Image (cartoon, coloured by chain):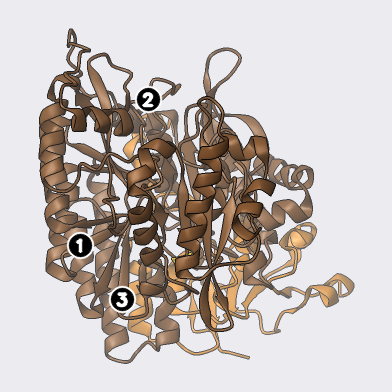
Amino acid sequence: MYKYDTYDQAMVDARVEEFRDQVRRRIDGHLSEDQFKPLRLMNGLYLQLHAYMLRVAVPYGTLSGAQMHALGDIADKYDRGYGHFTTRQNIQYNWIKLDEAPNILADLAKVEMHAIQTSGNCIRNTSSDQYAGAAADEVTDPRPYAELIRQWSTFHPEFCYLPRKFKIAVIASETDRAAMRLHDIGVQIVRGEGGELGAAFYVGGGMGRTPMIGPLIKAFVPLDQFITYAEACLRVYNRHGRRDNKYKARIKILVHELGKEEYTRQVEAEFAHLLSQNIEPPTAELERIKAQFADPAFETGLSEELDRSDPDFALWVDNNCVTHKASGYIAVTISLKPIGGIPGDASADQMRLMAALAAQYSFDELRVTHAQNIVLAHVRKDQLYALWQALDEAGLGTANLDLVGDIIACPGLDYCSLANARSIPVAQKIGQRLAAKEQQIGELKLKISGCINACGHHHAGHIGILGVDRKGTENYQLLLGGCEGADTSLGQITGPGFDEDGIVDAVEKATEVYLSTREGNERFLDTYRRIGMAPFKEALYG
Amino acid sequence: MAEVQFRFRDDEMVGDPGVTVGAFGEQSNAAAVRLEPGDEARDLLPHLSRLRLIEINFPVYGDGRGYTAARVLREAGYTGELRAVGDVLVDQLAFMRRCGFDAFAPEVPLDPADAQAALDRYPEVYQPAADGRVAIWAKRHADVQGG
Ligand code: SF4
């Protein structure tokens, strides 16, 4: 994985000192809260309902064991002994004291981490495929391109006061595991006609109150013009994106209002101009980064066999492990969704254990997934049972990847000052209610957001739940049929909303409709697509 | 009008305040113009040779269109004064310098020590912009840049 050189380290060290200085100016009264707010936000520090929350960047979701260990230590030292992994492949700490925040950044900098641009109207942390480097279907590892974007976008002087936040995803396989087309820019690394690599640009996707699937605006950008093209996309947005209404300020609205053709025309004109400005890193820089993402030294001649005699282990393998490109290896997802638990939370001890297991079993590397789980991407099959036992003992062996218990939930009203409703208790109740049936139900992606900002990606859930405020009480809308990936679709609202217990019943009813009408190997989503909304409405409201 | 508090050039200051882009179009002898966030910087490109001062207004610091306007003007070869006016705060100075601003007239004067610290903060930059600073990637590969 990527290692900082002295340049990278100097940048994060300077940031720590800058933020220390900003906090000092705030505490001694030089800065008003209004003036301080954009500065702390650029450092990922939010003022939540009860305390400050710090969001730490995990670039493209990849971490070393030492980094994960440090995250655990920070949870102990500055928070209440746990952290929350988010749908942006980051980690958040919910109980932070302002005067300690600079020390946390200093601790992070020691392990080559930071909170730069984890909030604010700038280019945010780039997301990627959690199986990068392990997936059999990728044309290349997408992370070097994401790292190139990380560096280009860090303190980009022109793009720190965009109309709105800006999220980029990079993938490199046909199967989209990163919801790439629901990002402001989605990049897919593809092979051109001559076999050379290039980048397909999808621009203007997003969730929030106006969910949109990003259209393809350029099928092939040569890699030696990759950053220049991204710069052109951003410049047109910075110049013309709407600033009159925060809810219409994302690039998806600009692309929609201009039309894909006109937006593309403007980007092409800017691109032609920028090509003369020599802003593209040399290919040697991409090669330098790529070398750091070279495959680890996989052993050869390993057995493909797994001893499945322990039924609990066999169930976990079937649910949580996927095929690896190297024979004898497998990619493992550690579920952070124990039954009745808080989705995405991990204790300090769990983090340190995962760090140690990564060192022992997976080339000292972990990934955070946008579904709020942790991946060990390169595990030897002949060591899988030992790994599972260690995980299971620590409460990390839940066998529910992509099942109804693998719920994505935003922090909601328990923490978030923008929330209309709580997400966490709803997730906990649904998880408990359906735990006994989840294997029978099979793949069912359930996603919960506490408000229209859609941090819980409810539009993209096979079942989505949106917290709304109805005359001062918490109310939940139910959506069906959303999906991310190659066949991205947006969920539709079933009808009137439900109260907290009502929404748990409603989800159960929806699963009953599915179980009684599914044909063959249909997943919930397939059945919904075949029979439509009507039978579900009938069961819910009839 | 706010005073120019910081200026990073040696030539003589233009005395007249900048006229609006609309007035500029009609006044063929004006040497100073003031751009608002919604104005199109590229409309000025045919007139760059006679311009000595372009003020770019930031009515609120969060409206970042002026950064693009500044870079566009520098990329087109404008060498006159580029002055940021309005809601200009300490922590925007370094970004503004990088986009080509070389004078600042903040509505509320800044603490000079804080401003200097902010301008000196970052030893390196990750990307080229309008200030001629050498990007980290260019330093990493100085041998392959070929001049
Ligand atoms: S979706 Fe709304 S409630 Fe949930 S974290 Fe985002 S802003 Fe907060």
Q: Ligand 1 near label 3 (Cβ, under 8 Å)?
A: no
Image coordinates of residue A150 in percent, x first then y, are 40, 47
Tag 1 residue: A82
Tag 2 residue: A135
Identify the mark at residue A52; answer none if there is no mark.
Answer: 3
> Amino acid under label 1?
Tyr
Q: Secondary structure at mark 1?
A: strand
Q: Secondary structure at mark 3?
A: strand
Colour brown belongs to chain: A
Q: Ligand 1 near label 2 (Cβ, under 8 Å)?
A: no
Left or right relative to A523: residue A150: left
Q: Nearer the viewer, residue B101 or A172?
A: A172
**What residue is rendered at 24% in x and 74% in y?**
A96
Corner quadrant of residue A402: top left
Give the letter of the chain under mark 3.
Answer: A
Left or right relative to A491: residue B146: left
Image coordinates of residue A140 in percent, x first then y, are 42, 24
Q: Ligand 1 near label 1 (Cβ, under 8 Å)?
A: no
Of labels 1 and 3, earlier in sequence is: 3
Corner quadrant of residue B90: bottom left
Q: Nearer the viewer, residue A268 or A526?
A: A526
Q: Residue furthest right?
A: B26
Colour orange belongs to chain: B
Q: Answer yes or no: are tags 3 and 2 on the same subunit.
A: yes
Of labels 2 and 1, earlier in sequence is: 1
Location of the C terminus of chain A by quadrant is: bottom right
> Amino acid under label 2?
Ala
Q: Nearer the viewer, residue A452 or A389?
A: A389
Give the letter of the chain under mark 2.
Answer: A
